[in-house]
């Protein structure tokens, strides 16, 4: 006895499901709600990590509105829904570039929180809104826009080199070069004990 077709077919990945939702939302706009529900938390963390929670609500709303308006042009062959949304969010962050730089400069003047935790926890806490170490904030403010985008897509969004390349429209090798250059600049500005950046 064989299983019914809907059980026998292999289950798609979440990326495939998300892509199908975006494509289906062109004809049925309500389908885009599922994309929003699935991706809002991650996109919000990324934007809040860059601009702070006060601005993040508006920027994320602008991101999803832009994605909704562009859903007909989404091409799953160019990458997943997540990187597509991060690309839109990164463009929206660019509209607030001065606010981002001012935020990093202000955070550079704040006394750091030296709570316990492993290396990953320290890096994540350092980059997250409201808990950024002053030295890291100063170093991030000193990076070029292009280098900062690559570093923060890696640190906050946890994208792969391929995904970052797709988000920014740059080759894989350029992602690596920018990331290496940014890491060197960050290391030079940070105290000992943060070598893992």
Image (spheres, rainbow, N blue to C red):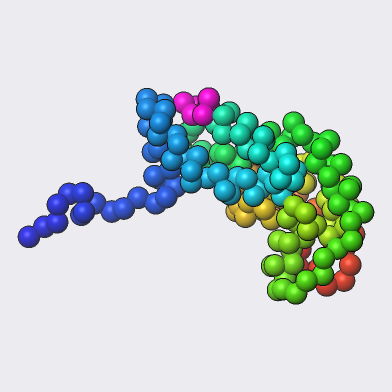
Q: Left or right of 63: which side holds 103? A: right
Which quarter of the figure is the C terminus placed in?
A: bottom right
- The residue positioned 20% from the left and 54% from the top of the image is 8
Magenta residues: mostly which secondary structure?
helix
> Image height check: is 46 above or below 180?
above
Stretch of the chain drawn in magenta? 68-73
Image quadrant assignment for residue 66: top right
- The residue positioned 75% from the left and 56% from the top of the image is 127
Residue at the extreme left of the image, as rendered: 1
Residue at the extreme right of the image, as rendered: 109
Q: Is residue 70 magenta?
A: yes
Q: Position of residue 123 (x, y in %)?
A: 74, 63
- The residue positioned 74% from the left and 31% from the top of the image is 95
Q: Is residue 157 magenta?
A: no
> Image height check: is 89 above or below 3?
above
Q: How many marks?
A: 0
Image quadrant assignment for residue 34: top left
Q: Position of residue 186 (x, y in %)?
A: 84, 57
Q: Left or right of 56: which side holds 138? A: right
Q: Is residue 159 visible?
A: yes
Front in this rendered view, residue 176 or 7:
7
Front in this rendered view, residue 73 or 97:
97
Q: Position of residue 51 (x, y in %)?
A: 75, 43
Q: Position of residue 162 (x, y in %)?
A: 59, 49
> Image height check: is 107 above or below 95?
below
- The residue positioned 69% from the left and 41% from the top of the image is 56
């Amino acid at each position: 006895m064989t299983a019914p077709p809907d059980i026998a077919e292999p289950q798609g990945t979440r990326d495939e499901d998300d892509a199908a939702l975006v494509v289906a939302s062109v004809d049925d706009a309500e389908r885009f709600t599922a994309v929003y529900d699935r991706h809002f938390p991650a996109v919000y963390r990324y934007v809040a990590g860059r601009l702070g929670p006060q601005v993040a609500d508006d920027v994320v709303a602008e991101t999803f509105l832009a994605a909704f308006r562009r859903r007909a042009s989404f091409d799953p062959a160019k990458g997943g829904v997540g990187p597509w949304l991060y690309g839109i969010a990164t463009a929206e962050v660019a509209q607030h570039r001065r606010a981002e730089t001012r935020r990093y400069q202000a955070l550079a003047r704040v006394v750091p929180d030296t709570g316990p935790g492993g290396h990953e926890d320290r890096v994540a806490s350092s980059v997250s809104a409201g808990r950024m170490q002053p030295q890291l904030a100063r170093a991030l403010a000193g990076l070029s826009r292009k280098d900062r985008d690559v570093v923060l897509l890696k640190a906050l969004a946890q994208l792969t080199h391929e995904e970052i390349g797709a988000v920014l429209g740059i080759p894989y090798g350029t992602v690596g070069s920018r990331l290496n250059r940014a890491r060197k600049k960050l290391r030079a500005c940070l105290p000992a004990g943060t070598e893992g950046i």
